[in-house]
Amino acid sequence: MLYTLCIVLILIASVILILAILVQSPKSGMAANFGAANQVMGVRESANILEKTTWTLAGLIVVLSLVATLAMDQNLVSTSNSALQNDANALMERMNTSAPVNAMPSAEIPAATNAATDGAAAEAADAAAEQAE
């Protein structure tokens, strides 16, 4: 029950946070913290309220996330973890039993035949003998 309530509040806070960020002027508020500021001094009150709202909602989402984590049903979490462990074990077993994959593909390299090599050497010897005559 508390878990569901936290999730609903996180969703509502997220939507409001998105709207608060979109309404802010890019020259003030949180955008000024990230280098988009052209104003040296003075922030309008509405921008100040929007910035405080943004930081408050961001903090609220973090706190609600932690509370939701603590409020989870432990039986459901353990069931989920055991199912995940079973899937991981099945995958590892499948990987160990499958045929190994060669890292590099094998390429057939034609071997030089002795007849072709011997024939070329004989022709070269005959040509050298003719030149010598």
Image (cartoon, helix red, strand yellow):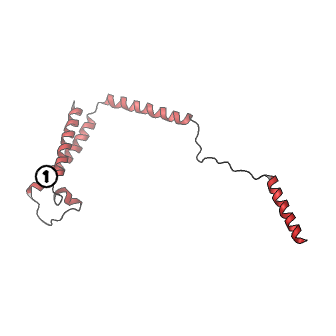
Instruction: Determine which quarter of the picture holds residue 126.
Output: bottom right
Q: From this view, report whether residue 31 is shown above or below residue 16.
A: below
Against 6, residue 104 (above or below) is below
Q: Secondary structure at mark 1?
A: helix
Instruction: Name the residue: 83% across, 57% down.
Output: 119
**Residue 63 pos. (x, y %):** 22, 43
Q: Position of residue 75 (x, y in %)?
A: 33, 28
In the displayed structure image, the side of residue 12 where residue 112 appears, left or right: right
Asked if residue 31 lies left or right of residue 102, the reply is left
- In the displayed image of the protein, which residue is found farthest to the bottom? 132
Q: Which residue matches tag 1?
A: 50
Q: What's the residue at 52%, 33% (across, down)?
A: 94
* Residue 114 in picture, x, y percent from top left: 81, 53
Front residue of 35 and 74? 35
Quadrant the C terminus occupies: bottom right
* Vertical order, 129 against 56 (above or below): below
Kind of residue indicated by mark 1 = Leu
Residue at x 18% of width, y 51% of height: 22
The single residue placed furthest to the left in the displayed view is 45
Tell whether 74 sits left or right of 96. Answer: left
Q: Quadrant of the N terminus?
A: top left
Give the x, y percent position of residue 96.
Answer: 55, 36
